[in-house]
Every structure is written in structure tokens, then in C-alpha cells.
Image: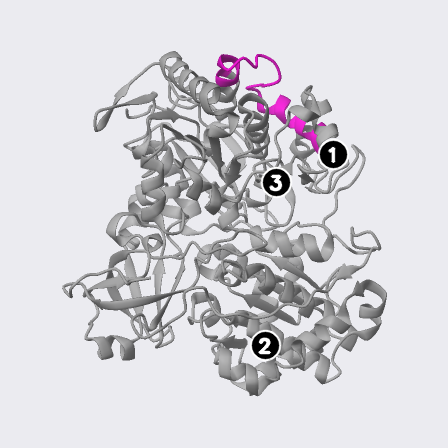
Amino acid sequence: MTPSCEPGPAAVATHCPYCALQCAQTLTLTTGGRLPVEVAGRDFPTNRGGLCQKGWTCAEVLRASDRITTPLIRSGEGFREASWDEALDLVAARISALRAELGADSIAVFGGGGLTNEKAYALGKFARVALGTRYIDYNGRFCMSSAAAASNRAFGMDRGLGFPLADLGGADAVLVLGSNVAATMPPFVQHLAGVRSRGGLVVVDPRESATAKLAGTDATGRAQGIHLAAVPGSDLVVILALTHIVLAEGLADESYLAARTQGLDDVRRSVAGWWPEHAEQVCGVPADDLRRTARLLAQASPARGGRGAYVLTGRGIEQMSQGTAAVQAAINLALVLGLVGRPGSGFGPITGQGNGQGGREHGQKADQLPGYRSISDPAARAHVARVWGVDPDSLPGPGVPAVQLLDLLGTDDGPRALLVHGSNVVVSAPNATKVTAALRSLDLLVVADFVPSETALLADVVLPVTQWAEEEGTMTNLEGRVIRRRLAVEPPAGVRSELWLWRELAARLGVTEGFSSDPAEVFEELRLASAGGVADYSGISWQRLDAGEELHWPCPADNHPGTPRVFLDRFPTPDGRARMLPVQHHAPADDVRADADVHLITGRVLQHYQSGAQTRRVDELNSAQPGPFVEVHPLLADRIGLADGDEALLTTRRGQAIAVVRLSEDIRADTVFMAFHWSGLGSANRLTNDATDPISGMPEFKVTAVRIEAAHAPAGVIAS
């Protein structure tokens, strides 16, 4: 199944397949050599010509030796090759039988934040029109759901960064809460050069990560910022304390608060008890450092004559059972300082996945229709139904968030079939062993992928689909900027686009109209469906993008310039004001205790992306980071008898994992770190907690109690 790539255009301007920076690239077809295309960085506002190691090597995945190029149907413990007609006929027959017996909700769909806007839109439509199921969600629930929930509650809109990334360069202070951008999206770092030169970068992280090191001293010994090494799970306390200090010391922007917000009095009361010395006892950050940070942010704010300040959040504070509360607290802090909706200042969550922004705007989420419309809103249902040519009453209601959906799989009242597109839940979902068991219990598992991911290897039917350089479409990056993805290489024979397979499958299910395999046609329909919605793309066209226009949504008309900076005049709330909401801190759902006295935190490494299904197939990246490891402070290692290079056994209430010990003084002595890119015994998500935030449905990936010991020690899962 080794592909052969047919010649395409000599040089194609497109974007990296990985993170939400969507760094610009030029792909040039080669006539010989090891790669089908050569990759070069292209000047673009987010990457300014630079690429990270993943970006430089991304073309390697096009030549993956185990690329799937023909449909596969399970046969015993393995697979046999099949034609597309046989595979789709089988899938359609089994879906039809389940729907006839158990109803439309016996089928579920799980999407991905890497799908183009066109595919994200079409998948949501396919689930609700062709399948008729309410059970659809996607892996973006594991990425941006807490930030989205808090932003919608506070501002009436969720758009990740509400400003161009380059705006950070002029700030006097940038507070980064729970994001290691130096490892996850290295070209981002150049936008922090200005604030570092002014000593204003503040990083909150239990580790002295690559990003936290940027806040250290420069070559001359001058401080570039502050690193606050909070106790895992206590980031919210840090934010509450900073807000307390700003209010108590008279550093708030009172005129901004009076003119542009509501809810200040409730927030003031809610932070009154978090004076710095009290907060220090919970979060471990010295009171003086909290005061220094609050004063730095205040002095940088426009109200006090500074160049500006930004508050940025990442998965470190969002992937918590109090993730929405933590982001709301960060928003409250930004509002108290008068930052949001002012040029040169602002608040923004840093989107992770390549199309994490666009992927959640057009219908993959359980409760949404295109344009970021609520599926429970009769007017929204009527608008989208008109575009789709269906009766609004035929559309299903809201489904359930990803973790709850995975929990329902295979149960008496839950879905009996699952279609997976653009996700590898066996590696990426929390409590992964439980998820694997749920997938095995299904009557039908269909996975569309281009390599045999761990999830695909469990499937009953595997459908080979195109990857990034083999397709046309659009993506929406972390700034809300809509960009063009362009075909550079023809896909291998036998491989099809998801748009084609959804059209073919819909026809077999009796829906013969309304599904196109042409991404340009799908985007034109998306424009109509999003018109008038919060995420209005109706004024964005492929023609405008191909002509070089830089367009950020909302863009409600063909002559509209787009909206690179939001909230400058008002917030999209009924009264135009931002809502400040009080929040309370609570400990992690699975906190440290006598039999599990160490915090486990999880994250990424520079060389790998998400579940690693793509990057683990690139020799250069795999050589640099070949397998799972656990980062341990020397003091902790000495206490439990571990040395660098030993194998450690990690045990939580959900399961066990084994990883190689890496000693590092960059982590707290009460904490260990694992990256989540690997499967099998080294999978960090065998350990992580599937407890969820009650508002966003976000699972608590980022902190859990763990017991760590030498791998030869007696094993035994911790009792509940």
C-alpha cells in the first residue's frame, strides 16, 4: 500500500498541517529524491517565514510507508482489502439496520479539529441530515471548550485571539497562563521578543518549560519577565490573587469598568478573600511575586500610560474540571485592567489544533449549527434548514459533549455505531483504556484516516482519505483569520476525500441531494449557512482569499474588510457590555493523597503533535523523541529510588503506564510530567482523569494524583 504521488503544480502556496498558527509554506514538487515535495517557509503574519521542526518535515507524512490506499474491512483479527462500493455498501447496510431497530441516535459521529472548514461543515450536516443523529461531537472538546464557554458567557462571542498575533509585539506585558508555546508552536515566540526586551513576560506553569525559560534573564543578566511555578491545579488561585491585588491597590481601570462591563461588585466580593499571603498557601507562589506581577500588568495597561498588556490562556488552565471558571477569572482580570477591546491590549485563548477555531464554528459541536448558532434556537434551526432544504423539525436536538458521548458508546441506551473522522481517540481521550473498551463493544466502528492509527486498528471498516497537501479548502487560524489550503500533490489512486465519501454514503442512506464533493461548492453553502450568525463567513470567498485579501471573521458582506480586532466599539451582548462573573476555586477532582502523593501533569513536546499518528511516522522527529518518558525532579527521584534512564511505573485510579525517567530540575519536586503522544503502555491518557468541567464538558487532562515507583515494583491499580 505504498503510494505514488502524481505530479502536481510546480510550486504551491499553502499552510502547515499541524497547529493553529497555520504557518505559511511553499511546497515544490521534486523530480527525484526522498520526498514528493520540498517545503519552504513563506512570509506570513503568524510565522514570518519561519517553521518549526514539525513544519519542515511535514511532507514526510505524504510518503508514510503504511499509508492506507484502499478500503479495509475487518476479517478475523486483521483486515482484507475491499472496493469502495463494497465498503460503503456494508457501512450503509449496517447503519440502516441499526437505525431501523434502535433509531437514528444509535449512530454517533466523532470529528476533528484538523478538518477543513468545508469538511467540518459537511460532517455536521451529514450527521444531522443523512444520519439524523444528535450524537456528534469532536476532539476540539478536548482543546478549546472551556475557553469557548467562558468567552461566550463573558463576551457573547468566542473567537480565540480577538486580535492579530503580531499585536503582541508592542506590549509592555504579556501574561501566559498554562501554555508552552515555545514547544508547541515555536514561531509564536518571535512575537514575544518586544515584551521580553521590556521585562514583561509572565508565565504561569508548574514546570520551567521552554516558554517559562523565556521569562528568565538575558545574556546581560537582565530579567525578561517572571515565572510563577504554581502548584498543579491552582492556576485559578493565582488569577484570583492577581485580581484581588489590582482591585485592593487601586490599579483597576475604573472608567473602563463603568463604561464597558457589568458584574464588578460580585467579582470584587469573590476575590476579597484571596489576599497574596492566603493565595500563597494554596498555589505555592510567593506573595511578593504575586504583587510584583499584578503591578507589572497594571503599569503596562493603557489606563496607566503603558504600551498595553495581554492575558493569554492555554490548555494548562483550561483542561481542568474548573477550566471554564479559570478562563472566566482570566477574563475578569483582563477586564479589571481595561484590556479587552482596546488596540494594543486584550485577552485571548491560544487555539491548539490546526482548525480548532473553524472546526468548532460550523457544526461539529454537539450543540451547534453553522455560524456558531445554537441548535436549540428555533430561528437558527429555521435559517440553516432553509439552506439545507429540509424541515427544521427534522433536525435533531443537541447531543452530549465528547467524554459523555464516549461513555455512552455500546451501552443499552447509547450509540451502537461510531464514525470517526480526523481523530485518534484511543490515544487522545482521557481514561484511554476505558475508551478502548467502549470502542470494542460497538456493533460498528468506521474510521476514516490516511494511516493506520490506533483507533483505525480497532475499526470494522477503515476508509482511506486525503491528507493536507492533497486537498483544497480553507482553515481558520488562532486569530480568526481564514486561509486557503491548496492541493499540491494528487492523492494516491484509491484514496478519496471525506466530502466524496459522505456524499456517497448519504446517497446509500436515501439522501441523494444536498451533498457535494467539490469543496468550493461546499464553502459557498457554508457562507449562506453562516450568514447572520456569530461566526459570519458570508463575505469571505475563495476568490477574495486567492486574491491575497487578509480576512478575519466576522465578515458579513462581499465588500466588508473583515474584523481583525473585535470588541473595539461594543461586545456582542444585549447591552454591549462584557459580563464579569464571580468564580470559586476547588481542588482537582483527583487530588494528591497518601497512596498517590504526586501530581501528574501532561502536555506536548516540540517534535510531536496530538496523538502522534502523523509525527511518529517521521524519522527525524521520532529519532529526536522516540518514546514515552516521565520528567521527574532529582529530589523526588532520590526519595523513591529512581535514576535517570530507569523505567518507572505510574499508577492512578484509572490505570497504569510505564515510561523512562528523565531527571530535570525544571519541574516541581511534588510533580511529574508526561507527554501524551504515545500509545500502549506508555500512554499518558491511560492515567488521566475523565472528570469534566460542568459547563464546558472539558476533561481534567492536566492534573491527577499518581503513584510513581520503579517499574519492577508490584503493580496494582489504586482503589477508588
Q: Tell me which residue sits at (42%, 70%) in the image.
A: 207
Chief secondary structure of the magenta span? helix
Could you tell which of marks 3 and 2 lies nearer the N-terminus? 2
- Label 3, on which residue? 367
Q: Tell me which residue sits at (29%, 71%) in the image.
A: 595
* Residue 627 in sight in this render: no
Spatial separation of the CA atoms under disc 3 and disc 1: 13 Å
- Label 1, on which residue? 378
User: Residue 3 colored magenta?
Assistant: no
Q: Which residues are magenta?
A: 504-530
**Amino acid marked by disc 3:** Asp
Q: Is residue 643 left or right of residue 182?
A: left
Say which element carries label 1. helix
Say which element carries label 3. loop
Q: Quadrant of residue 264?
A: bottom right
Contact (CB < 8 A) between labels 3 and 1?
no
Check disc 3: other Cα within 10 Å, few if <14, some if 14-19, many if 20+.
many
Could you tell which of marks 2 and 1 lies nearer the N-terminus? 2
Check disc 1: other Cα within 10 Å, few if <14, some if 14-19, many if 20+.
few
- In percent of width and height, residue 136 lies at 53, 35
**Amino acid marked by disc 1:** Pro
Check disc 2: other Cα within 10 Å, few if <14, some if 14-19, many if 20+.
many
- Label 2, on which residue? 199
Could you tell which of marks 3 and 1 lies nearer the N-terminus? 3
Q: Tell me which residue sits at (71%, 84%) in the image.
A: 248
Q: In the image shown, does 263 or 487 lie closer to the viewer?
A: 263
**Amino acid marked by disc 2:** Gly
Q: In the image shown, does 597 or 662 lie closer to the viewer?
A: 597
Q: Nearer the viewer, mark 2 or mark 1?
A: 1
